[in-house]
Image: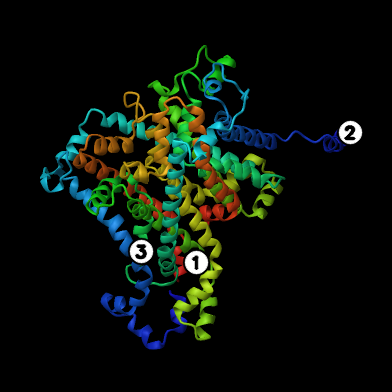
Amino acid sequence: MATDRNVIAPAPALRRKRGSILRQVVEHRADYLYVLPAILVMLVVIAYPIYYTIELSFFKTPPNLQMKDKIFVGLDNYAAILSSASFRRVTLNTLIWTVLSTGFAFILGLAAALALHREFAGRGLLRAILLIPYVVSAVAASYVWKWLYHSDFGVIGALSVQLGITDRPINFLDNTTTVLPSLIVVNVWKEFSFAMVMLMAGLQTVPEQLLRAARVDGANTWQSFWHVTFPHLRGVSMVTVLLLMVANFNAFIIPWIMTGGGPAGASDIWITDIYTIAFGRQRYGVASAYAVILFVVMMVLGTFYVKALTRGDDGRAQ
Amino acid sequence: MTATPQPARRAARKPFDGWRWAGRLTILFLLVFTVLPMAWMVLTSIKTQFAALQYPPQWWPAEPTLANYWRLINPADSTGREFLLYFWNSLFVSLTTTILGVVVAVPAAYAFSRFRFPGRQLLFFAVLVRNMFPAVVFLMPLFLLMRWMGLVNTHGSLILTYLTFGLPLSIWLLKGFFDNIPVQLEQAARIDGATRFQAFLLIVMPLSTPGIIATSIFSFIGAWNEYVYAYTFLSKQDSMTLPVGIQRFFTEFATDWPGLMAATFLMSVPVVVLFLVLQKYFVRALTEGAVKH
């Protein structure tokens, strides 16, 4: 409990702490000054938008966006999305996109972290190089990969022909079966190194003595990884997977710039769908309802996320 | 009797270590996977339009040229004027967002780390949860809000909205750094007569410089790379930032791939340089909080 207060504050303040909430608030009023600017900004740009999205989700909004003309329609917007023909397909795409992107990024990141765990010359440089895609803008990455995938002049198509894998260049992005996997590759390229960095940090917390003890007991590399290293990585892995899942679920730039959700909606995910409904068709009410559904899904994930992140926080507060 | 010489022989010719080789192959694969696209971007950017559109591709540019870059940074050229304007806009918006964000986030993060005031848990929960929500949830209402405030097509709209993701992240990162600074240092200063604010300013702030740097890099990179808000709020060329502006190169010169690759390269330079120079802080910020015991 607020260590510096307990040591420094005079005794009467301590006794007063057991008062009503109001009294506590008054007593801590100086503390709020530090948080006030942040609260103000967050009220305007976070709380208000959330409130307004929820409100709009119950209204039919006019195409000219004169919001005073909006009409209350109850739950119609929700019904419109859930019963729309494309919703099921977009949801399936979103699941495939989120799960595969997260899975591959995590596995590649784990492999990289394990491979880079041993000290060797140039390790730092290697880690830096592998991290560059994570730092570079998704817009830049999208254009570069669009060029790599180009149906006529793309280097990937040309390579696969020269290596005898295919007869002629594959049209990766204009084909409903190849488009989603192609985008997932880009996404994994962009973010596997995030998992790598997190897991490298996690590996450093594995106690050396335990690994040595396992070796003495005759464990092979795989056994000591599975029984010693991996259990120690569970916490970091959980946070990493959650963060990746959230990021992938909310991804917009790569699918939007590379395909715009096409062809024929084959790479449309929730976020791109919402964007099209809102800013393409000016149906803010429907898009808001869609956003609220997304919001609820995220809240479920959010509970896990906060639990994983604040682990240990209360320990420090004691 | 045959068992005795065996250990000696095995030590002489190093045993094949499968795991070590698997590690090396993994690194090789990841290196190729990571570097090839970036290398191809650079190689294309120094090709002529003609050389870029050949099949099979010219692996190495026959006549390398810097003309694509020169066009982008030459203020006498109309393309160059446009590109430099976007670049400047991006720099202005990102720097302003970073400074504003850190100024607001530092005291808030300090309060979350040190004080136990009523509502702290709830507020902190709000800060954390914000990172979960996609820009799209905030996009429609913020667009209407910006229109109402007359900020559409201005940098003000971007700076304000970038705080939606910059602020929570900064608060979270900075709190992690403040948590690691022993409270005893402040207590000592307080006993010597400093006020709590002075102790924060003179003891905690200097000690958390690495954290503040790391947070600033994150904010800057986030703002520099931001696309969705800029794409929605800005329709006038004067105010466009690079990620949005670059699309105009694409549509205007529909097949100018070398030019586009040169532009994406220049767009990536500031963040990559910043990252390489301050890598240590960046990695620390990324993993701070996730790997505490």
Residue carrying label 1: B179
Give the letter of the chain under mark 2: B
Residue carrying label 2: B1
**The quarter of the displayed image where residue B115 is located:** bottom left
Q: Amino acid at mark 2?
A: Met
Q: Amino acid at mark 1?
A: Asp
Q: Which mark is residue A38?
A: 3
Label 2 secondary element: loop
The quadrant in which the N terminus of chain A is found is bottom left
In this rendered view, identify the residue nearer to me: A147 or A89. Answer: A147
Task: Tell me how far mark 1 sits from mark 3, CA to CA.
Answer: 19 Å
Residue found at x 46% / y 20%: A151
Label 1 secondary element: helix
- Please give left or right for residue B216 compared with residue B46 in the image: left
Residue A159 in percent (x, y) is at 57, 20
The image shows residue B262, relative to residue B279, as above or below, that is: above
Residue extending furthest toward the front: B76
Q: Is residue B88 visible?
A: yes
Label 3 secondary element: helix
Q: Amino acid at mark 3?
A: Ala
